[in-house]
Image (cartoon, rainbow, N blue to C red):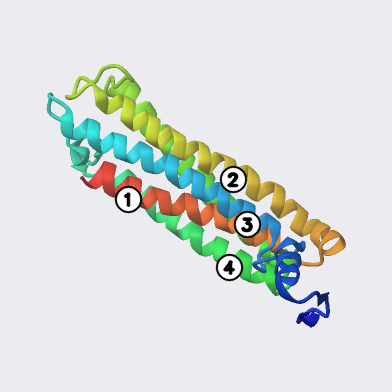
Amino acid sequence: MSEAVMTDTGDVLPGGAKGIVADFAADKQAFAVPWGKAMMWFFLLSDTFIFGCFLTSYMTVRMSARDAWPVPSEVFALSFGGEPIPLILIAIMTFILISSSGTMAMAVNMGYRGERNKAFWLMMATAAFGVMFVSMQAFEWTKLIVDDGVRLWSNPMGAAQFGATFFMITGFHGLHVSAGVIFLIVIGRRVKSGFYDRTRGNYEMVEITGLYWHFVDLVWVFIFAFFYLW
């Protein structure tokens, strides 16, 4: 007859096959990952599949289009002093979004150091960057729709599929940025009020917010590369 075994946690398990069954059936945490962070990772993984499908569909549509695809450096150029500058607005938007990742990373650091006032203002700076990005995207959409006549179903500059793919991908990403701004403001206000000191004793939610925001920034890098530079 097998002897009983004591685990590292002090639990006593029966020996042999019964001990193996009891060990596997016990309610234990396999990985030391907080529940909220794990759920955010699952959400980001599912979102990765969605954006991956969008970008793959875009590449398929573009390579199979019969009409000429508009040249991004010409479509997204802005004129200053009479001279068009290719992708200047997109470059500024990219710089803003990448800079927001820096402020978000500093906010997470301040949160874990317990400096909630600094964490709050860094989160608000990140949200402000997000508002600037969405505002510039709204300007970009307005220019394409009003000035250039691009629609979901037509495009006077070439392939008709350009409008549908552009508005679908950038609109879905812009929706994520807008949701992120709201998320930052809500969590930031709780940080400033000391809500997490009273309820959790840590600022894990700041890091979870940061995971979402860094994901949004990373997705934009792929959109920038595939849609604006290709």
Indicate which disc, 1 or 3, sits on the residue closer to the N terminus. 3
Outermost residue, right direction?
198
- From this viewpoint, is residue 203 visible? yes
Question: Percent position (x, y) of residue 143?
Answer: 33, 28
Q: Which mark is residue 197?
A: none
Marks 2 and 1: CB-CB under 8 Å?
Answer: no
Label 4 crowding class (10 Å Cα cut-off): few <14, some 14-19, many 20+? some
Q: Which quadrant would the C terminus be assigned to in this image?
A: top left
Check disc 3 and report its element: helix, strand or loop: helix
Q: Which residue is mark 2?
A: 181
Residue density around tag 3, few if under 14, some if 14–19, many if 20 or more, within 10 Å:
some
Q: Nearer the viewer, mark 4 or mark 1?
A: 4
Disc 1 marks which residue?
91
**Label 1: element kind:** helix
> How far is mark 2 from mark 1, CA to CA?
21 Å
In terms of sequence position, does the residue under pointer 4 or pointer 3 come before the other?
3
Which quarter of the rendering shows the N terminus? bottom right
Say which residue appears at 56% left-offset and 47% top-offset.
43
Comes first in the chain, label 4 or label 2: 4
Q: Position of residue 130 (x, y in %)?
A: 52, 47
| Residue annotated with mark 3 | 38
Name which residue lies at 68% across and 55% down.
Answer: 36
Which badge, 2 or 1, is on the more N-terminal residue?
Answer: 1
Q: Amino acid at mark 4?
A: Met
Q: Residue furthest front?
A: 1
Report crowding for label 2: few under 14, some 14 to 19, many 20 or more residues within 10 A (C-alpha): many
Disc 4: which residue: 106
- The disc labelled 2 sits on which kind of residue? Val
